[in-house]
């Protein structure tokens, strides 16, 4: 065995040269937490911000204990905690799709809870809370997971805790492990779930009548969990968009090197287009579609395609037979006519199950087309076969189309090709397609996400030690040192009627047309379409001069005067 | 206009924060070139290495001037050049697919040629040499392109200079621009072309009877241009594999976070599997297919699928319903039975053009199956429809199947799913597919590629100033400071009979089963399949403690005692 082979064996199991180095990176903390080496918990005081939604009255009726306790008032750091709290038993879990920085939330929690309290990890997400599969997290664990990507230290899943039986299981887990608090790291749905859990576990859980505190931590790479200046962005968004931006920047560089290809890139983010907008701001490609704009302007598929084809033709006439187009994953559902057609299709398919099943595949489109309104039938007929087949064939268990399976990028390529041919048959158009999604969820967190999540963990732990429940931890002032704050979850809830039942939801933050980020994008995009003005943002760096960037859309929307964040 | 908007405008057109920072990075140079700030040209002397191939006699007959001049002897640096050469006019071009570091070759050339000589860039590849579209490269250009990715400074294409007319056009360009030398940055084909050009332009090009020197520089992300210890690796391979390795590492991290998906990743590299092997060594996934091993062991498609399904089932039985499989782009052609079937298919299709064209699409498989030998017919029948359609439908202009269009990753997923069901119907198997290719060609070069290419440029320029022609620039001793050397191109050539004509080729270096890199992989892969031992190599870094890595396969194959390179 040579030295080199020994070195290689030592890189197995999360010990690449990079991982071993990045774990040593010290993280800055908000001044409120004291020193970076030994962060101390803070206590909290009320601000004069009271949150409300259109459904606040209804929510108050359903969350009486939480709302009575919090008054829906935002909390802010009140300086070092005076009382040393000992003996708390806290469980942390990841919920939903992974996002970079989750491990640092755990690290922050463990550090701030200190040796006097116990932190447990819940394995494999909410399901683990039901099953009661917990293990104690040690300092050695923290040293090993610090600054590493993914949720693999605990695992995750998408179980939604809804039924009485599930709530009983959670209570059983709380009793069995004698828990005092649960930290839920998740997106809008998971934080809604945290609010419901907080109310359900508010009191009377354990033999002495005490309850279990529940604190949420805002995660999602989609960036659709934003609450004005209280929550500039969820964690994971920066890392994901930086990873996608490097790939898109590399591809842009490739287009102007090879001089012969278009690349159509679909970007993860099922509802909002924050990811596509951020990647556009980072890389300045020829074209970027924003779902919210398509909906706001009631654009038809044909008009979108025509817009794409026009740019392809104009660039070609200037000698540029190449370019990059970015499209958000959820685009199709935001095109009003597609949405309407899909809704009618769902109805027709549901009402003619046996007739459709009896038909040969190639006979289905005509049959179903004959049942649709004229507009929808003609729209369906205009689509390529593979899209029609998918629209007719695939339904999920609720009878809904699985939109995420639609190869939007291929659809746009094929329809643009046709339209380009109509506009100018001499224009060459060769295109490759990409879907960037899973690559971005579990990378090592950028320094922004790493520092942000570590401080979110410190904040969540402080809230627990301060006896709070039903809050989401947040850090405000990300360009001015950072301040630990807490958002009352019940104050965020709206009520939606789904499947004949009232459901609570935290509204997804979509891209606003009047936001500074969108307006800046709109002001520049024509120039980006006509000229090669792209930039290659490169791979995210952990050492050196370029480490302290924050997302451009966040900087613009928060009125920052710099692209750099400042925590501590 | 706010300050932030001004800052954003300043990042357009290749001026991202990263690009602006990385261009300032100083590059190390081999001791032979003197100081890093002001590198000086070296002269060359013969070594005792004489290159030969099985076709050396035939090549000598076709390349009389080149072989007479070089004797097929490898050259090495003989210390600082004593005579200051002035007035040389040199053109540089990129040929074929882009690779990271091409810009630094240009920078090295410009720096070593100095103010006394003139460097021209040929736009858009070999085609630009035919058209004579050249422009003078300035010091300002060099400052702007240093350490940036892509070939976009010049552009590239795949034109092969073969016909008498094309050679005449090249001569015309040489005369028109009064060129003394041409540097061809390209892969095996382009360096073969450089050898042919060197012979063709050896003398009698210009009015005074003088010739034009031609020097090749070894580029290709595929890594199949390797010449033992003389050329450990082509440039671009390190950057591409590091980019792919980050993505695969992120995906691995995602699999053990989400706990429910397999990801099948196809990796660029049409012939050799060097890329797949290197990414496997970097990330240690559950499974990696190596085309050369499939060919060497004469594996059938069914046996490959069975091997994959076995691992999926075994991991599932251990609770791991997830994993990552890497497959090289060219896999299908290396499966002997597939290769044989495709060859017979090509024949059958060529002989029944009109009959096949007259058939409906769904009638074609049966008709063509009836014309095939029994084995091939049964193999064809075993494949999914979309593969059969592609095998029957798509032929390039030479009547050959376009193998790169076959969705190998989808084929493997679908066939593995079927086989898993046969082995154990209770095993869940949900898979996503990826193709990593274009993302990796044009990223900013790793420090390895950046330093390597800068020194290749210094070497190529030195060879020109030293009056040499028909050589490929190389740097040996990449872990011991680096030594500029030159490989006589004619000494690498073999003769292949293609389309009834003798063609010269530099043999592609495939993965050897007995190479240390392959043997190390084989020694570890069972463990990687049974256990989660993966590593996330993270994004390549340009500052800090992890910058000096070299490819693991290169380190193993060159007997290095460290994963770090050392130039200068």
Image (cartoon, coloured by chain):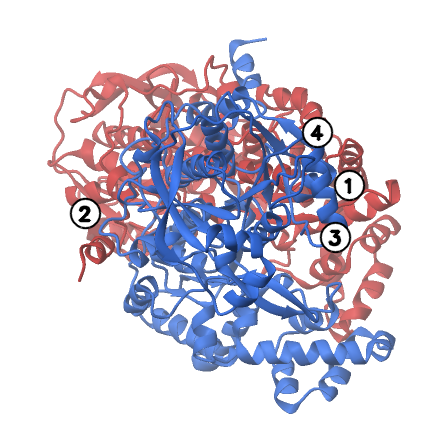
Chain colours: A blue, B red
Is tag 1's residue or tag 2's residue first in the polypeptide sequence? 2
Q: In this figure, which residue is indicated by the disc labeled 3?
A: A164
Tell me the number on the disc at residue B501: none
Q: Chain of mark 1?
A: B
> In the orientation shown, which residue stands out farthest toward the front?
A208
- Ranked by sequence position, the earlier of labels 2 and 4 is 2
Q: Closer to the camera: disc 1 or disc 4? A: 4
Label 3 and label 1: CA atoms lie apart by 45 Å
Q: CA distance from mark 4 to mark 3?
A: 41 Å
SS type, badge 1: helix
Residue at horizontal 39%, vertical 41%?
Answer: A44
Q: Are marks 2 and 4 in contact (CB under 8 Å)?
A: no
Of badges 2 and 3, the one in the foreground is 3
> Label 2: chain?
B
**CA separation, marks 2 and 4?**
60 Å
Question: What residue is pinned by disc 2?
Answer: B178
| Number of residues whose C-alpha sits closer than 10 Å to that of mark 3, classed few (under 14), some (14–19) or many (20 or more) | few
Q: Is residue A484 visible?
A: no
């Amino acid at each position: 065995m040579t030295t080199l082979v020994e070195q290689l064996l030592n890189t197995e199991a999360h010990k690449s040269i990079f991982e071993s180095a990045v774990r040593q990176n010290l993280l800055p903390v908000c001044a409120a937490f004291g020193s970076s080496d030994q962060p101390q918990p803070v206590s909290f005081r009320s601000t004069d911000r009271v949150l409300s939604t259109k459904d606040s009255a209804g929510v108050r009726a359903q969350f009486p204990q939480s709302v009575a306790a919090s008054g829906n008032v935002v909390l802010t750091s009140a300086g070092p905690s005076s009382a040393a709290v000992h003996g708390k038993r806290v469980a942390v879990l990841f919920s939903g799709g992974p996002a970079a920085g989750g491990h640092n939330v755990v690290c922050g929690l463990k550090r701030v809870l200190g040796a006097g309290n116990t932190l447990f990890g819940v394995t494999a997400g909410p399901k683990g809370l039901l099953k009661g599969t917990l293990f104690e997290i040690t300092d050695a664990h923290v040293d090993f997971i610090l600054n590493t990507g993914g949720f693999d230290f605990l695992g995750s899943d998408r179980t939604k805790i809804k039924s009485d039986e599930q709530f009983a299981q959670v209570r059983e887990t709380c009793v069995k492990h004698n828990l005092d608090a649960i930290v839920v790291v998740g997106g809008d749905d998971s934080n809604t779930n945290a609010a419901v859990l907080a109310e359900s576990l508010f009191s009377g859980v354990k033999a002495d009548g005490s309850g279990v505190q529940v604190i949420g931590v805002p995660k999602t790479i989609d960036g659709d969990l934003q609450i004005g200046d209280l929550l500039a962005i969820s964690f994971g968004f920066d890392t994901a968009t930086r990873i996608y931006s490097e790939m898109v920047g590399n591809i842009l560089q490739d287009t102007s090197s090879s001089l012969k290809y278009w690349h159509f890139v679909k970007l993860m983010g099922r509802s909002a287009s924050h990811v596509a907008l951020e990647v556009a701001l980072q890389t300045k490609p020829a074209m970027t579609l924003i779902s919210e704009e398509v909906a706001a302007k009631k654009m038809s598929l044909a008009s979108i395609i025509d817009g794409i084809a026009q740019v392809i033709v104009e660039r070609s006439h200037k000698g540029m037979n190449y370019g990059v187009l970015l499209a958000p994953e959820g685009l199709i559902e935001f095109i009003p006519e597609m949405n309407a057609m899909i809704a009618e299709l769902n109805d027709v398919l549901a009402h003619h199950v046996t007739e459709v099943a009896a038909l040969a595949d190639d006979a289905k489109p005509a049959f179903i087309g004959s049942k649709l309104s004229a507009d929808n039938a003609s729209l369906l007929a205009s689509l390529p076969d593979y899209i029609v087949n998918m629209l007719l064939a695939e339904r999920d268990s609720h009878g809904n189309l699985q939109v995420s399976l639609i190869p939007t990028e291929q659809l746009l390529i094929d329809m643009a090709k046709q339209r380009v041919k109509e506009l100018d048959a001499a224009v060459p158009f060769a295109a490759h397609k990409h879907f960037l999604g899973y690559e971005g969820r579990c990378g090592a967190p950028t320094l922004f996400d790493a520092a942000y999540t570590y401080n979110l963990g410190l904040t969540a732990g402080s809230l627990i030690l301060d006896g709070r429940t039903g809050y989401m931890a947040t850090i405000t002032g990300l360009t001015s040192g950072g301040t630990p704050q807490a958002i009352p979850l019940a104050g965020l809830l709206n009520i939606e009627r789904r499947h004949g039942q009232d459901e609570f939801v935290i509204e997804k933050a979509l891209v606003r047309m009047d936001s500074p980020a969108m307006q800046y994008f709109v002001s520049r995009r024509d120039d980006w379409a006509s000229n090669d003005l792209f930039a290659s943002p490169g791979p995210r760096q952990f050492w050196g001069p370029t480490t302290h960037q924050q997302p451009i859309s966040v900087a613009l929307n928060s009125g920052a005067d710099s692209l750099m964040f400042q925590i501590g």
